[in-house]
Amino acid sequence: MTWVTGTVLYIVIWWLVLFTVLPWGVKVPDKVEPGMATSAPEQPRMWLKLGITSGISALIWSICYLIITSDLITLRPPP
């Protein structure tokens, strides 16, 4: 795996994990202010969610890296 494919793999994993982490802890306000969406969360806590996303993505990426570099799963034809 080159550094380019590793970076692209991390970015794809990061975005997938972000979309699974975004709904965590969402609390919709009882009273909605005018001009705001009714589904907008009270406290989105985006920095916390971005940190959690980066940590989970790094763990998943390192597992993928180990699997790819150890040839446990290979897509190359046998010699």
Image (spheres, rainbow, N blue to C red):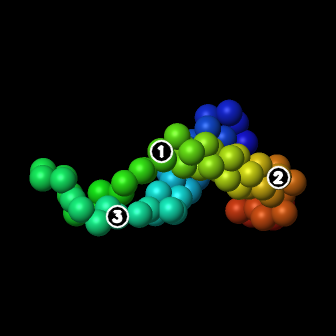
- Sequence order check: which comes first, mark 3 or mark 1? 3
* Pointers 3 and 1 in contact (C-beta within 8 Å): no
Q: Quadrant of residue 75?
A: bottom right
Quadrant for residue 29, please give it: bottom left
Which residue corresponds to mark 1? 46
What residue would you read off at disc 3?
A: 28
Q: Position of residue 30 (x, y in %)?
A: 29, 66
- Residue visible at 47% across and 45% down? 46
Tell us which disc is closer to us: 2 or 3.
Answer: 3
Q: In whole angstroms, how far apart are the C-alphas of marks 3 and 1?
A: 15 Å
| Label 2 to label 3: alpha-carbon separation | 41 Å
Q: Amino acid at mark 3?
A: Val
Secondary structure at badge 1 equals helix
Amino acid type at image mark 2: Leu
Q: Secondary structure at mark 2?
A: helix
Q: Amino acid at mark 1?
A: Met
Residue 33 image point, x, y percent: 18, 53
Residue 4 left/right relative to 18: right
Relative to residue 12, is residue 40 drawn left or right? Answer: left
- Residue 77 picture location, percent across and down: 74, 63
Q: Quadrant of the N terminus?
A: top right
Tell me what residue is drawn at x 61 percent, y 43 percent.
51
Please tell me whether mark 3 sits on a helix, a strand or a loop.
loop
